[in-house]
């Protein structure tokens, strides 16, 4: 009896789904992966369309969309307007989140260790080498920091999480900006490499005295000890949806061609300094009309119905006015006949 009920349910789901391909493929940023996975599961349950998203890093996502091996790419490093035009791509923000320093120091509880941007840069430079070095002791009076070597953990793959982290360090450390800079892949002065947010999280957890950086959802899900950061207003703040929202509050998306906007080191007493948006990349002219339409159906569903899931993972949904701007961009995506692929939810 149970098998017949499940079979009937599967047939009903299939019949209710749009005609054509029932799977859309995307790849890229690991930063939003925990959220995209939850959205995809919920969307598939309602629309019968599977979203196959490969969490391979922003560099890989940019490469795959440019080679047309996926229906959409995802990146935390927004592409500049001239590169979008040259590649025939459109770009728009999907959600906002935060990158957080995570540590594995015996006896140090989450949210106890305080860091500043310059000190964080010096740790990742390899200049501050022990947890009881003077700059850390001075920032953390009363905290029993051990005489233990610091093990730096960073991404080994092309990563938008790295871009956000390094872009922040470039803003607060002139030396970092000059010698290392910010990109999805950089030449690290020191440290161990881990693939993906997952790899950095696991390596940090397995290495005593380690410090790494991950998207906040990974820190939260893995119950990792995060540090407090001193923001631009001089306040030590914790990472959460409120501090990410504060950082994004003054964002002027309408003034950013291709939505190319960075949210690191923003003003505001509650602002988390290592905040960033994650972006979707699609072709402006496409031969795969049905697949592109279903991608936009998934993204539209996520904007409209995914807020609670985003909140539960401490991501910040895009403001309604930005969603409206994004949907205007969708109307520039056309098929071979020159007609818009997106005609609104009613036309899906």
Image: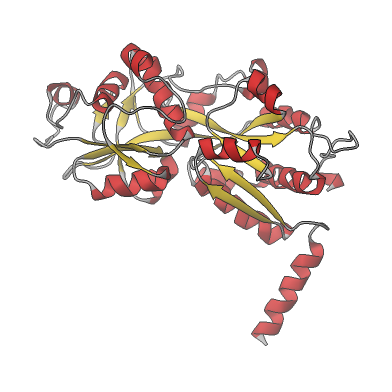
Q: Is residue 109 left or right of residue 68?
A: left
Taking depth in this image into account, of 148 and 270 the one nearest to the observer is 148
The picture quadrant where one finds residue 153 is top left
Q: Residue furthest front?
A: 67
Q: Quadrant of residue 27?
A: top right
Residue at 77% x, 29% y is 328
| Residue appearing at x 26%, y 24% in the figure | 125
328 shown above or below 23: above
Is the N terminus in the top left, top right, bottom left or bottom right quadrant?
A: bottom right
User: In this view, which residue lies farthest toward the left?
Assistant: 147
Instruction: Pinpoint residue 250: horizontal percent, then vertical percent.
Output: 55, 19
Judging depth in this view, the residue of 286 and 315 nearest the camera is 286
Whole-percent x and y of residue 83? 64, 22
Query: Which image quadrant is residue 154 in?
Result: top left
Color style of the picture: secondary structure
Identify which residue, 74 or 185, lies in the foreground: 185
Q: Residue at x 38, y 15 (%)?
A: 177
Left or right: 199, with 45 as reference point: left
Q: Position of residue 14 (x, y in %)?
A: 77, 66
> In this figure, what is the number of numbered marks?
0
Tell me, yes or no, if residue 232 can be seen here: no
* Residue 175 drawn at (x, y percent): 31, 13
């Amino acid at each position: 009896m149970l098998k017949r009920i499940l079979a009937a349910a599967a047939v009903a789901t299939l019949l209710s789904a749009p005609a054509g391909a029932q799977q859309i493929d995307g790849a890229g940023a690991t930063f939003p992966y925990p959220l995209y996975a939850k959205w995809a599961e919920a969307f598939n349950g309602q629309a019968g369309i599977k979203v196959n998203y490969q969490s391979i890093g922003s560099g890989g996502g940019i490469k795959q969309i440019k080679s047309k091996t996926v229906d959409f790419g995802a990146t935390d490093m927004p592409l500049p307007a001239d590169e979008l035009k040259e590649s025939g791509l459109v770009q728009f923000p999907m959600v906002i989140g935060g990158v957080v320093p995570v540590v594995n120091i015996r006896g140090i509880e989450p949210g106890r260790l305080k860091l500043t941007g310059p000190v964080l840069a010096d740790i990742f430079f390899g200049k501050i080498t022990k947890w009881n070095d003077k700059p850390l002791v001075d920032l953390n009076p009363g905290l029993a920091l051990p005489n233990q070597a610091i093990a730096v953990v960073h991404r080994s793959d092309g990563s938008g999480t790295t871009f956000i982290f390094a872009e922040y360090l470039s803003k607060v450390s002139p030396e970092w900006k000059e010698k290392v800079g910010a990109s999805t892949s950089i030449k690290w002065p020191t440290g161990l490499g881990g693939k993906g947010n997952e790899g950095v999280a696991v390596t940090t957890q397995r290495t005593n005295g380690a410090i790494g950086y991950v998207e906040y959802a990974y820190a939260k899900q893995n119950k990792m000890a995060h540090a407090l950061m001193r923001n631009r207003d001089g306040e030590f703040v914790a990472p959460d949806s409120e501090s990410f929202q504060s950082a994004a509050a003054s964002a002027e998306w309408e003034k950013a061609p291709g939505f190319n906007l960075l949210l690191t080191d923003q003003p505001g007493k509650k602002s988390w300094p290592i905040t960033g948006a994650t972006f979707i990349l699609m072709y402006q002219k496409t031969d795969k009309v049905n697949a592109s339409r279903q991608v936009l159906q998934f993204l539209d569903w996520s904007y409209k119905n995914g807020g609670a899931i985003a909140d539960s993972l401490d991501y910040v949904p895009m403001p309604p006015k930005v969603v409206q701007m994004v949907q205007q961009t969708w109307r520039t995506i056309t098929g071979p006949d020159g007609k818009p692929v997106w005609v609104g939810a009613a036309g899906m």
